[in-house]
């Protein structure tokens, strides 16, 4: 069973038989898969009045534990976006009463981003549905295949410097 990436690789093998194009099989599929998954997740969260970036902040804050707050810098590290992008994202979320800015208890110059009760309820209501949606997206793989893929992707991500933990 071939796919669009196989067609690309076949074309390159025909045009440039001197170059071993095996990496296209992995990189091309990961790129295509990332676009498809992002579109699926964006559609899921839009049905609930959120965009994927807002859901990213909500899930990051919720899994951080009580009192469900992080500094903007910690959010940048967790979501791998620029500080300007996270500021705009937070501004939108404050307007929706999903998060609020609170001064740090120790260093008043530092601001923390905290889930509001509405934000916590929103992510708590959506989390199980989100996981069920991700399960649906992976239904072509059995659990062993999915775990193997996760292991391989972890190795690749680490080798490329993705070591952020939150």
Image (cartoon, rainbow, N blue to C red):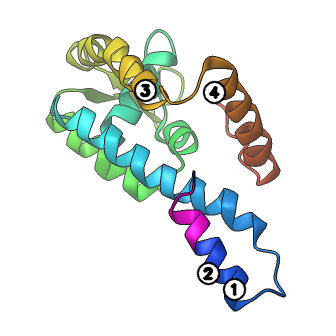
Disc ID at residue 14: 1
Residue denoted by label 3:
134
**Secondary structure of the residue carrying numbered label 4:** helix
Pointers 1 and 3 in contact (CB under 8 A)?
no
Name the residue located 75 percent from the left edge and 32 percent from the top edge. 151
Residue denoted by label 2:
11
- The quadrant the C terminus occupies is top right
**What is the crowding at mark 4: few (fewer than 14 residues within 10 Å), some, or many (at least 20)?**
some
**Secondary structure of the residue carrying numbered label 1:** helix
- In primary-sequence order, the first of circles 1 and 4 is 1
Left or right placement of residue 92 versus residue 31 in this view: left
Measure how far apart labels 4 and 2 are at the Cα level: 30 Å
Measure how far apart labels 1 and 4 are at the Cα level: 33 Å
Image coordinates for residue 83, horizontal then vertical, percent = 46, 54
Pointers 3 and 4 in contact (CB under 8 A)?
no
Image coordinates for residue 116, horizontal then vertical, percent = 26, 18
Magenta-tinted stretch? 2-7
Measure how far apart labels 1 and 3 are at the Cα level: 38 Å
Q: Nearer the viewer, mark 3 or mark 2?
A: 2
């Amino acid at each position: 069973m071939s796919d669009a990436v196989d067609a690309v690789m076949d074309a390159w093998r025909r045009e440039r038989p001197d170059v071993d194009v095996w990496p296209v099989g992995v990189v091309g599929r990961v790129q295509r898969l990332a676009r498809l998954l992002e579109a699926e997740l964006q559609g899921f969260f839009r049905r609930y009045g959120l965009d994927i970036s807002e859901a990213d902040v909500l899930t990051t804050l919720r899994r951080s534990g009580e009192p469900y707050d992080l500094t903007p810098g910690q959010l940048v590290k967790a979501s791998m976006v620029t500080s300007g992008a996270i500021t705009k994202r937070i501004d939108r979320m404050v307007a929706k009463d999903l998060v609020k800015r609170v001064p740090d208890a120790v260093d008043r110059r530092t601001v923390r981003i905290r889930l509001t009760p509405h934000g916590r309820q929103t992510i708590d209501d959506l989390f199980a549905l989100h996981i069920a949606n991700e399960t649906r997206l992976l239904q072509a793989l059995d659990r062993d295949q999915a775990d193997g893929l996760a292991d391989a992707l972890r190795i690749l991500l680490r080798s490329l410097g993705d070591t952020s933990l939150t």
